[in-house]
Each structure stands twice: as C-alpha cells, then as structure tokens.
Image (cartoon, grey):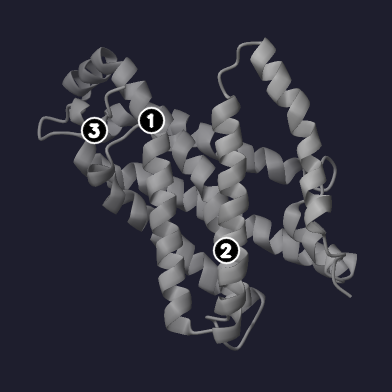
Amino acid sequence: MGAQDLGILSLASLLVFLIPILYLNTRLKLAINQTLITSIVRMCVQLGFVGVYLEFLFQLNSPALNTVYLLIMISIACQSIIRSCNLKFKLFFVPVFFALLIPFVIILFFFNAVVVRIDNLFEAKYLIPIGGMLLGNSLRSIIIGLTSFYSGIQKDEKVYLYSISLLNNRILALKPYFLQSFSAAIAPIIASMATIGLVSLPGMMTGQILGGSIPLVAIKYQIAIMLSIFYTEYFSTMLAIVFSLKVAFNELDVLNQEIFISK
C-alpha cells in the first residue's frame, strides 16, 4: 500500500502559511518576498517537470539515458555550487565537476552493487533518487568548504604570504585554512548523523514507511544512505578544494584575485 495521494487543493492549502510570512517580511522591511515567491514557484514548476520526466525515465529505464541525466544533474550542481561561492564558473567548473563525479560514481555504484545488490546497476528507480540524495547533500558541504577556504585566504592574505615566505611550501601554508574550512563543511552532516532518529525522522525513512515498508527495513535503508551521503560529502569537499588549487593560485603561489566575481 502506497502513501495517500495529495489533491491539488490540499497541496495549495499549505500556501496559507505564506501570507503571514510575506506580511512580516514587509513590516520588518526584509527584502526577500520577491526572491521567496520566485523560489517557491520555481520549486513547484521544477518538481512538476521532474515528476513527469521521471515517470518517462523509469518506464524507459535506459542505461544511456539514465547516465546522461546523472551527468546533467552533476553539471547543474556544479553551477549552483560555483555561483553560491561567488567564484568564476569558467575557472572552477572542471575541478568541481570531477570533485563531485569521482566519489559520486564510486559510492553510488557501490551502494547499488554491494549494499542493495540489484542486478541492473543502472536501474532508474535506484540510480536517480539515490544519486539525487548524494548530490543534493554534497552541495552544502562543498559550498561551505570552498567559500570558507578562499574567503579565509583572501581575508588573511598577508598572513598567508608571510607563511609562504617562512615555510617556502604552499601546502604547509594552506594547511590551516584547509583544516578550518573542511571541518566547517562536514560539521553539519556529522551533527545530523549524531541526532538522527532522536531529533528528526529523515526523508528516506519517512518515504519508505509511507510507501508501505516496515520500519526496520526503512531504518536499514536510512543508515545505508546516511553513510553514503557522508562519504560523498567528505571526499567531494576535499577533492573540490584540492582540485581547485591549480586554477586559484599563480606560479608564485599567490591567490589569484581574478577567481572571484565582483559584487
């Protein structure tokens, strides 16, 4: 037995809570109403499109089409990450793309082959939703990691250059900034794992229970996906910083100010 279907009017009824939010924003002079409304409209349109497209994707279940869709997802994720970090797209797309792609592919196919043990590793109903969860959660950690790393060096440029002159080694000079930014990036997922089940019932577990799975099966899937998300976030964040070093510094190990988008 699946979850209870939602009518359009039932779904639209949730917008009633938007009215006081828009009112409070106006009274408090928070200039976010237009952005908020645009985001909600985009979310509805995008999810509606994805819902229709995924039905077609699941029915066709083509390995080639599924792979192309995942690559598109990664590319869109890269664009979102780079824009959020205020970095130049043309410089950072390749490093961020491969930083996402490598751990994503390894962990996703390990999940399908070893954990779930499905015969067709490109099975759309596993590949797309699991891949989406891995990518969606990795966005936050990479954004925090890259933003903290490069803004920290930009802010303390004189300290960094002094460290270079003393140590004559870029890796050692960058180590404090890397450790600080990387720790900040993975702190949310570590905190989430520590409180999951006590503070919140996560999405995958809730979805499986609503879909008719028994709680113990849903819990096992949730443990598996949380570990997979953590591994993907950990390695993709680390690789994003490491891979981007080549484009971010010049031959004298000085941070290239051209990597930032002028505000």
Q: Is residue 128 left or right of residue 205?
A: left
Alpha-carbon neighbours of circle 2 within 10 Å: few (<14), some, or many (≥20)? few
Residue beneath the point at 62% across and 66% down: 51
260 or 218, nearer to the observer: 260
Q: Nearer the viewer, mark 1 or mark 3?
A: 3
Separation of disc 1 and disc 2 at Cα?
A: 34 Å
Among the two numbered marks 1 and 2 on one chain, the one whose residue lies closer to the N terminus: 2
- Identify the residue under disc 1: 149
Rendering coords of residue 85 (x, y %):
39, 34
Left of 230 or right of it: where is 222?
right
Count of labels in the image:
3
Q: Secondary structure at mark 1?
A: helix
Q: Amino acid at mark 1?
A: Phe
Is any part of residue 111 visible from this angle?
A: no
- Horizontal side of 26 relative to 78 (left or right) equals right
Q: Position of residue 204 (x, y in %)?
A: 73, 59
Q: Assign a secondary structure to mark 3.
A: helix
Query: Which amino acid, mark 3?
Result: Ile
x and y, in percent, of residue 78 in the image: 39, 50
**Can you say which quadrant of the picture contains the N terminus?**
bottom right
Residue drawn at point x = 56 percent, y = 62 percent: 49
First in sequence: mark 1 vs mark 3: 1
The residue pinned by badge 2 equals 50
Badge 2 marks a residue whose secondary structure is: helix
Q: From this viewpoint, is residue 180 visible? A: yes
* Of residues 205 and 7, the one drawn nearer to the viewer in this rendering: 7
Local packing at callout 3 (Cα closer than 10 Å; few below 14, some 14-19, many 20+) is some
Q: Relative to 34, is 101 above or below?
A: below
| Front residue of this view, candidates 40 and 79 | 40
